[in-house]
Image: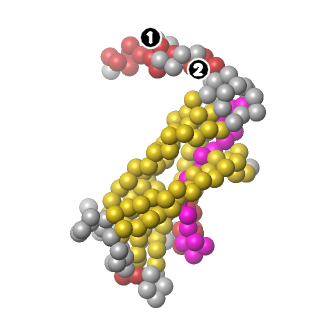
Amino acid sequence: MAILALAGCRSTQEVLQIGEAAERNPGPCPRAFALFDASRLVEIRGDGKENFNNVGFTGEINAVRSLCRYFADRPINGDLTIDFALGRGPAATESSHTYEYFVAVTRKNIDVIEKQVFPLNVTFPAGVDRVTVTEEIDRIIIPRANDTTSGENFEIVVGFVVTPEQRAFNNDGKRFRVSAGQN
């Protein structure tokens, strides 16, 4: 509690040691989030029926965090951290899998400015059916029209690259979790 009290007595600029950016930043950072219908991935193998024995690899985006910096007429410089929970179901015969996820920068509720797809290579150790992975994207640059354009005008959207069937599965609220019924 003493640290918070001391921090309250100093300026943001002093506490964060970020120089003049603390005084000139025209607004908040872009909102970063996982797109609902692409935030989970369930691979159905075999005869295509949606039952647990046909589940191959699964994935879920657990958290998306971002920080940004901008001031004066400079672009927004952002960092992104994504936490994934990945699973290997009974129909997955391989120990390695490459997931694909995207990061897109959009004008808020308007259109995509840029989108990039990234591979996420995972090897499940023997006897392990789920792992967590944290990915970091350390340089997202968003140009601004002028020095009064706020980061609030943009969004950073992430998700798995999914098929139309996987998207429909997600939209229907269905899910298979490798950890279901376990603590």
Residue 21 is marked as: 2
Asked if one can make out residue 72 in the rendered structure from this viewpoint, the answer is: yes
Examine the rendered structure and indicate whether residue 43 appears above or below residue 1.
below
Q: Secondary structure at mark 2?
A: helix
Mark 1 lies on a secondary structure that is loop
| Mark 2 and mark 1 residues within 8 Å of each other at the beta carbon | no
How many numbered marks appear?
Answer: 2
Is residue 182 shown left or right of residue 5?
A: left
In front here: 140 or 182? Answer: 140
Measuring from the top left, give residue 92's x and y in whole percent.
37, 76
Magenta-tinted stretch: 149-166
Q: Outermost residue, right direction?
A: 145
Residue 84 placed where, x, y %? 42, 55
Give the number of the disc on residue 9.
1
- Magenta segment includes 156: yes
Foreground of the two, 172 or 166: 166
Residue at the outermost bottom position: 47
Residue placed at 46% from the left, 45% from the top?
136
Q: Residue at x 58, y 41 (%)?
A: 140
* Residue 39 shows in this picture: no
Q: Considering only order in the chain, which callout, 1 or 2, is on the residue closer to the N terminus?
A: 1
